[in-house]
Amino acid sequence: MVAEHIRKWLQGNPTRRLLVLADEADAFLTADSRPAYTAGGQSTFPTVMKLQGLMEESDRRFKVVFAGLHQVQRFGHLSNVTVVHGGPSILVGPLTHPAALRLVAEPMAALGYAFDRPELVWRVLAATNYQANLVQIFCSELVRTMHTRSVGEDGRPATISEDDVQSVAASDVVRQRIAERLRFTINLEDRYRVLALVIALRSLEDGYAGGYTPKELLDRAGEVWAEGFAQLSAGQVRIYLEEMEGLGLLIRLSDQRRFAVRSPNVVNMLGTRDELAVELAETEFGLPYDYNPRAARRLLGPDQEGIARFSPLTEGQLFEGLRPGVSIVAASALFQTPMIVRAVSVYAESRGMKVLSHGARDDLGGCVADATRLRIPHVIVADLRGIGSLALKDASERLLAYTGPTVSDTPAARPLDARDGTATRVAVILADPVPAAELIDGPVRFVRPERWSVDSLRSWPECPFGSLDERRRLIGATGGWPHLVERVISLVTRGGFTLEGALSSACTLTVEATPVRIHLERSGLSAPQLDLLTLWSAHVEEGGRVGTADVAAVLDLTVAEAEVLLLRLVDLDLLDQSDTGVALDPVTFRALIAARVASDGAAE
């Protein structure tokens, strides 16, 4: 349908052009590359093929540019892939010598700063591996350093000396930020990471004497991580190495058979010999992320602070929630409930559905009457937060009478675009978790947003917390609450923070008085429940796992009462559950501790 509208728009005026710029396209191309089985057999890249067809039909007045990282590069190099027929690939890798020199010298000159000697510019480039983003980090700190210097007697800014360049190069913050940026690249996939660490360690052991063949690196990588390399051949490893060459990590030696690190500085950024050996020996590596709609979330855009906000619901939950019938999304205010409404609306509109908004104080009958007149697929998005269970039950029954039976998740379910009337009618209710829990056994579909997890973070495009350990630390600091995760990642990607600095900021934020009060107010907990959990936090350490009997003993409850409490905490998504027991999510736990300390201090 979208392609047809584009086609008609282009046909309406021969001077019209449409250029679609698709950034972070790696996950999309990976998903589109999977075999699709139709009556005509098996095919791959069905969406890309439609885009290519539209390009050809329009004499390329319609064009698509895919930008991304390793997957975009990989598909662009395979001759049997549809993507390559759209146009040439342009590799955005390390800068050329002239471009790198200009990037350092010209902006500094525009600020009035000149280098004492030309070779100092080369020192900057050696420290930054000719990577534009690393040059930006280095020179930004260099500017800050120069701003602390006095202006000369002639009124001109001081020139940049060797000591200035050396002080920036030796800065722990700069070194850490540059190293983390490099890590963003190798942490795209653990096979990259293992190969990079292996070749870096071998280079240190051999004194950078030469390069290594794909077979040599495959054998060593297989010793480190058998599961990750067992099914790969030397030829497949060569593809990874060529991609790493394109990303500016490696170079290919003159014999075209061996690969080496681009510069010893790359190895220095990764760590010392002992650190690399420990990382290879102790890291828990994981296989490449496979797109999963149960984890992937769509980007909704930046908020007023410029922080990128994602849908609190996954793509799978949005698909299920907008099937014919009535769905109840039960969520506390900690899930940024306005974002849920926005995500549902954006998803529905992208599927050609008309969205009708309804508030708790609006006339539901009038909204249904307006919907009845529609002859196109539509969804009533009813924000019914703040009403009780009886009123919620009445509203859900009235909407159910309008939409018809809720479609079950079975192959026989009617498609979303069916034209038999009821199949096009959908209602999504946003409700508070407590009254919604009373309807869980009813004829409606339930959707509950979930916090980000260590595993689901793998679906975040170009997440700076790429390794398993980094993702665990991020979840430990933020509890996986969307607004905190998004803020921390923004501090790294936009604010210039190191990973450590961003995590520290999150931990500080979660124990400050105002954020603590807001968190507990938005959690959905009643006053008696807050008292019980405050007692819990006084007897159990953060992250401590306990069973139902332990909860009952600590809180002086019967086992049945403890079970009811735990179920309510599950409804509010305030528990982390595992085979060894349950624990309060870390942010809620820290908020309870901070509130108790503040209360005790006020009492004194």
Image (cartoon, grey):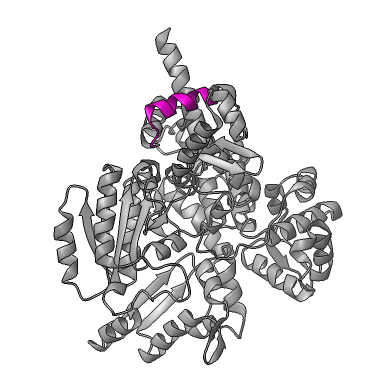
The answer to whether 226 appears left or right of 393 in the picture is right
Kindly report the secondary structure that dominates the magenta region of the rendered protein.
helix
The stretch in magenta equals 524-536
The outermost residue toward the top is: 604
Residue depicted at x 58% and y 69%? 71
The answer to whether 139 appears left or right of 434 in the picture is right
The answer to whether 209 appears left or right of 312 in the picture is right
Q: Position of residue 109 (x, y in %)?
A: 44, 50
Q: Nearest the camera: 6 or 421? A: 421
Res. 17 image quadrant: bottom left
**Can you say whether 90 is above or below 53 in the image?**
above
Image quadrant for the C terminus? top left
Residue depicted at x 58% and y 22%? 539
The answer to whether 377 appears left or right of 199 in the picture is left
Q: Nearest the camera: 360 or 518? A: 360
Asked if the stretch drawn in magenta spans residue 525, the answer is: yes
Q: Is residue 171 visible?
A: no
**Can you say whether 539 is above or below 397 in the image?**
above
Residue depicted at x 38% and y 27%? 527
How many numbered discs, if any?
0
Q: Nearest the camera: 222 or 363? A: 363
Q: Position of residue 319 (x, y in %)?
A: 41, 65
Q: Position of residue 282 (x, y in %)?
A: 77, 46
Asked if the stretch drawn in magenta spans residue 55, the answer is: no
Q: Is residue 333 visible?
A: yes
Q: Position of residue 422 (x, y in %)?
A: 28, 73
Residue depicted at x 44% and y 38%? 157
Q: Nearest the camera: 529 or 184? A: 529
Image quadrant for the N terminus? bottom left
